[in-house]
Amino acid sequence: MTHTKDGHRYQVTELPPETAIVVHPDVAGQPASRTAEGALEEAVGLTSAINLDVRHAWVTPVRKVRPATLLGAGAVEDLKTHCDADEIDVVIIDTQLSPAQQRNLEREIGAKVIDRTGLILEIFGARARTSEGR
């Protein structure tokens, strides 16, 4: 796309949106105000709001929270497999993660990991109109 500003022409190249996976952990024993599928659908909508191309989305049962990653080894391996196969850029985990859990997941799956709080902050940042708001 070519634009003109102050008499100068410049080319603007739009990059394709980053690819994403959205995972809603269904933690056993946690009270739920909505269904896991409803929560996943909402998370996918929020992810799309910041122009991420959602390639996969699923609910994963979590019987026992793992302090290092929140998710069990099988779920982490599934994420890694999908990230590698589909060249996924970002994984959204639809719950709050500790900084250590986020860092450990990023190391294990090889993609950027954003928790629910981070996703909401990304939306606000993307929609902010002033530099102060961003």
Image: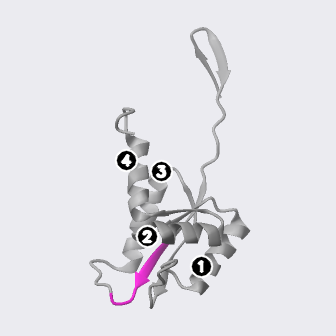
The range drawn in magenta is 23-29
Amino acid bearing label 3: Ile
- Above or below 115: residue 31: below
Of the two numbered discs 2 and 1 on the same chain, state the one appearing first in sequence.
1
Which residue: 45% across, 78% down? 25
Which residue: 43% across, 70% down? 97
Amino acid bearing label 4: Phe
Which residue: 64% across, 46% down? 16
Whether residue 56 is visible: no
**Label 3: which residue?**
50
- Above or below 55: residue 24: below
Residue 20 or 132: which is nearer the viewer?
Answer: 132
Gap in angstroms between the C-alphas marked 3 and 1:
24 Å
Of the two numbered discs 1 and 4 on the same chain, state the one appearing first in sequence.
1
The quadrant of the image that shows the C terminus is top left
Gap in angstroms between the C-alphas marked 4 and 3:
9 Å
Kindly check if marks 4 and 3 are in contact, taking CB atoms under 8 A apart as contact: no
Instruction: Name the front one of labels 2 and 3.
Output: 2
**Which picture quadrant has residue 91?**
bottom right
**Label 1: which residue?**
76
Dot 4 alpha-carbon crowd within 10 angstroms: few under 14, some 14 to 19, many 20 or more: some
Instruction: Name the front one of labels 3 and 1.
Output: 1
**Label 2: which residue?**
97
Gap in angstroms between the C-alphas marked 2 and 1:
14 Å
**Label 4: which residue?**
124
